[in-house]
């Protein structure tokens, strides 16, 4: 879950001992639903939570202030926390019946929470929340079983973020990203590692659930999960992938297993090798470009992910970077819906949030922003625009339990890279445990 | 005298107090009044949640849905969970390697400081500092930096031409590094040892010196026996603390217990299952297994103490 698209700072939490767990479960037993506000006077208070950095908190609070100005009878209490702790805290507050009214989610979480009956089906508040203005492809990210539970904050696409400065130093040309294969990717990374100082690498280890999803889509036409909510990926695909990545580590194209394990424990953009200006390429989400640029101090570019040469097509997909959802237990669903509507459809919110949560899915908002973009945002807008013409992968949201996939893949990946397991054993273990997690 | 020594003394004098005088009864009332806030806290934030977790351990509970009664399923599932056994192995290794080392370091330093150095208070504070900081997040992050692949330790080793491994990122070394981390926080047992050393009557040393005992003999025949209640107290406490270790592994491994589960402490796995994977019923069952393990070990400890702990009173 650490690799969910986010520009959020990675923080830490001082939690201790099983006694705390016991205390919290106990708190969960004494369920009290404490919503804010007083219904009669028309004055209502709602709560809105998200994860991320202090910069994000600043601009979001400004957008919320604009909302409060536009709706003087609604007060919004905001809560933000680092990504690592966000979902742990959310599950605990849901257990206590004390979750915020508007909850930011991402990846497979909306589905997990909706299937467990936590989220409001959005057609119930359609009078206050206009979804018609948003791109359909993006909207489908919050839709399952024909019902809509999440509003995309913006659109992202998976890409290779590349550092042209390191390419140049190594004397390697940027690839033609419309025709490169994964083998090309490995060869280029190896060449760059060889042509640069020892602590600079061609690529970071590219293994993460999103990459595996993409790779599987390119090779078999199906990603990690089936639309029916099962596991679609087969061990041979994973084995082939591990064959590629272990080859890259052995060749020095990617860092040692030990370095990869260390990097996995600190995943904020500025802590990655790419963010430190020590890797030429990394598979990542397009909305992280600004953070990587800031960290490395270089003018990074976005490239289309390799793999076009396979028979199954591009495998590219657009994904909502985050989704706004509303709690089913919210005492003020209309006010919550108005807030969400304001955040995604109103230029007064967009002026502050811009593309912090992905490229806005509302074309009017996109047009509104386009006049006033930073260099990094221009690259990002242009890239997402180019990719939206190539999308063919049917995006399948991971089923309940699939949020375990990140930790699971990291564990198996470490075992394979350290040589404790063969790619074949690792692939089998990954698929078996993933099936257990989602069953 | 240590708390446990006090307890032992209490037990021995209990029979004499079977019939309290009126004055003593008044004392008891006062005690009850003063203890009341503590009892309320105990009931509300300890006993209540603990009983709730006992109930939850017999349910399938995702935190998001209401718990469903599943009887002993969680406990049965534990028997077939390889990661649970990994986490037990990691935790036991951690406890049984780091606690003796930590106590040895604490005792060694306490003996050294007890020789009446100038500025003892300063040294004592300096050595105590890691104990205060040890469980903090900031220090765990600092350790992650120091022991990283390109961290301070490896830069130092590099000066001598040694290419050090990733101390926290290699499955062969990560647990060892955390053990060193725990040994480093020897300050609080050290302070207790120091207090214990001060209580050993000086005349015993004088008498043994007259009898011709050397320093080593005095240490074996006087210091250690009279210090056994303190050693016992520290041992029980540090074992319990070590079983509950969480922060270091959580921060150093990014919350995963990695690499390859080499630092998957029991508490970390419990947390991951309960709050990350939303298996709170299973996590509650794990908490109870941990409670049983700690209780059993403490009982064994107390039982064994009859044979080696010497109360000089």
Image (cartoon, rainbow, N blue to C red):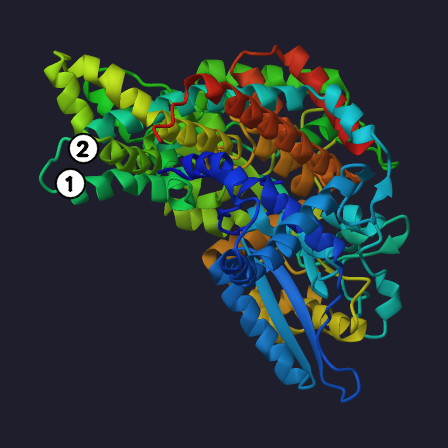
Q: Chain of mark 2?
A: B
Q: Which residue is mark 1?
A: B120
Q: Chain of mark 1?
A: B
Q: Nearer the viewer, residue A123 or A30?
A: A30
Q: CA distance from mark 2 to mark 1?
A: 7 Å
Q: Between disc 2 and disc 1, whose residue precedes?
A: 2
Q: Is residue A157 left or right of residue A432?
A: left
Q: Is residue A145 above or below residue A362?
A: above
Whether residue A170 is visible, yes or no, is no
Q: Nearer the viewer, residue A85 or B45?
A: B45
SS state under label 2: helix
Query: Is there CB contact under 8 Å for labels 2 and 1?
Result: yes
Q: Which residue is mark 2?
A: B113
Which residue extends farthest right?
A: A146
Identify the image quadrant of the C terminus of chain A. top right
Q: Dot 2 surroundings within 10 Å: few (below 14), some, or many (20 or more)?
A: some
């Amino acid at each position: 879950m650490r690799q969910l698209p986010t520009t959020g700072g990675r923080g830490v939490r001082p939690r201790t001992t099983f006694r705390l767990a016991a205390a919290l479960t106990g708190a969960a037993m004494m369920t009290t639903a404490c919503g804010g506000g007083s219904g009669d006077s028309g004055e209502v208070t709602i709560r809105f939570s998200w994860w991320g950095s202090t910069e994000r908190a600043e601009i979001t609070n400004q957008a919320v202030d604009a909302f409060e100005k536009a709706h003087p009878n609604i007060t919004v209490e905001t809560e933000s926390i680092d990504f690592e702790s966000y979902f742990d805290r959310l599950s605990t507050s849901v257990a206590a019946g004390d979750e915020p009214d508007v909850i930011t989610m991402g990846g497979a979480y909306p589905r997990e929470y909706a299937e467990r009956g936590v989220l409001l089906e959005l057609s119930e508040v359609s009078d206050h929340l206009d979804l018609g203005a948003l791109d359909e492809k993006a909207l489908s990210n919050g839709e399952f079983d024909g019902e809509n539970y999440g509003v995309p904050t913006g659109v992202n696409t998976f890409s290779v973020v590349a550092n042209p400065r390191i390419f140049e130093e190594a004397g390697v040309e940027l690839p033609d990203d419309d025709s490169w294969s994964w083998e090309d990717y490995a060869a280029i990374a190896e060449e760059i590692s060889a042509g640069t100082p020892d602590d600079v690498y061609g690529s970071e280890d590219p293994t993460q659930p999103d990459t595996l999803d993409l790779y599987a889509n390119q090779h078999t036409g199906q990603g990690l999960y089936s639309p029916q909510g099962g596991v679609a990926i087969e061990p041979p695909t994973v084995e082939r992938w591990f064959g590629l990545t272990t080859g890259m580590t052995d060749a020095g194209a990617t860092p040692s297993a030990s370095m990869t394990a260390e990097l996995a424990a600190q995943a904020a953009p500025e802590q990655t090798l790419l963010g430190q200006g020590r890797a030429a390429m990394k598979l990542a989400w397009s909305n992280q470009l600004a953070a990587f640029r800031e960290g490395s101090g270089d003018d990074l570019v976005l490239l289309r992910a390799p793999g076009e040469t396979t028979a199954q097509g591009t495998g590219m997909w657009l994904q909502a970077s985050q989704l706004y959802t509303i709690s089913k237990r919210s005492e003020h669903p209309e006010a919550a819906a108005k807030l969400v509507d304001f955040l995604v459809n109103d230029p007064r919110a967009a002026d502050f949030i811009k593309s912090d949560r992905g490229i806005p899915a509302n074309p009017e908002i996109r047009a509104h922003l386009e006049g006033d973009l930073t260099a990094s945002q221009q690259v990002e807008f242009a890239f997402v625009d180019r990719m939206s013409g190539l999308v063919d992968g049917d995006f399948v949201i991971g089923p309940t339990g699939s949020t375990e996939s990140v930790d699971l893949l990291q564990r198996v990946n470490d075992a394979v890279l350290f040589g404790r397991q063969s790619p074949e054993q690792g692939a089998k273990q990954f698929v078996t445990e993933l099936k257990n997690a989602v069953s | 005298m240590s708390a446990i020594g006090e307890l032992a003394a209490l037990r021995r004098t209990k029979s004499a107090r079977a019939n309290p005088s009126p004055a003593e009864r008044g004392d008891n009332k006062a005690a009850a009044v003063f203890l009341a806030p503590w009892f309320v806290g105990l009931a509300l934030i300890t006993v209540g949640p603990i009983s709730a977790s006992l109930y939850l351990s017999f349910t399938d509970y995702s935190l998001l849905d209401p718990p469903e009664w599943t009887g002993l399923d969680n406990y049965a599932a534990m028997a077939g969970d390889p990661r649970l056994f990994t986490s037990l192995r990691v935790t036991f290794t951690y406890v049984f390697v780091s606690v003796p080392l930590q106590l040895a370091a604490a005792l060694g330093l306490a003996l050294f400081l007890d020789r009446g150095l100038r500025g003892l208070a300063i040294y004592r504070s300096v050595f105590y500092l890691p104990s205060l900081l040890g469980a903090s997040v900031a220090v765990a992050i600092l350790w992650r930096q120091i022991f990283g692949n390109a961290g301070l330790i490896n830069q130092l080793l590099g000066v001598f031409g040694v290419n050090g491994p990733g101390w926290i990122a290699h499955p062969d070394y990560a647990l060892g590094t955390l053990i060193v981390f725990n040994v480093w926080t020897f300050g609080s047992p050290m302070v207790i040892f120091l207090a214990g050393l001060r209580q050993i009557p000086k005349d015993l040393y004088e008498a043994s010196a007259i009898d011709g005992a050397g320093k080593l003999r005095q240490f074996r025949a006087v210091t250690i026996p009279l210090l056994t209640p303190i050693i016992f107290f520290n041992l029980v406490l540090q074992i319990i603390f070590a079983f509950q270790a969480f922060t270091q592994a959580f921060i150093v491994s990014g919350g995963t217990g990695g690499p390859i589960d080499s630092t998957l402490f029991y508490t970390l796995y419990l947390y991951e299952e309960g709050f990350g994977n939303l298996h709170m019923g299973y996590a509650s069952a794990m908490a109870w297994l941990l409670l049983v393990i700690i209780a059993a070990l403490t009982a064994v400890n107390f039982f064994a103490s009859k044979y080696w702990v010497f109360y000089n009173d």
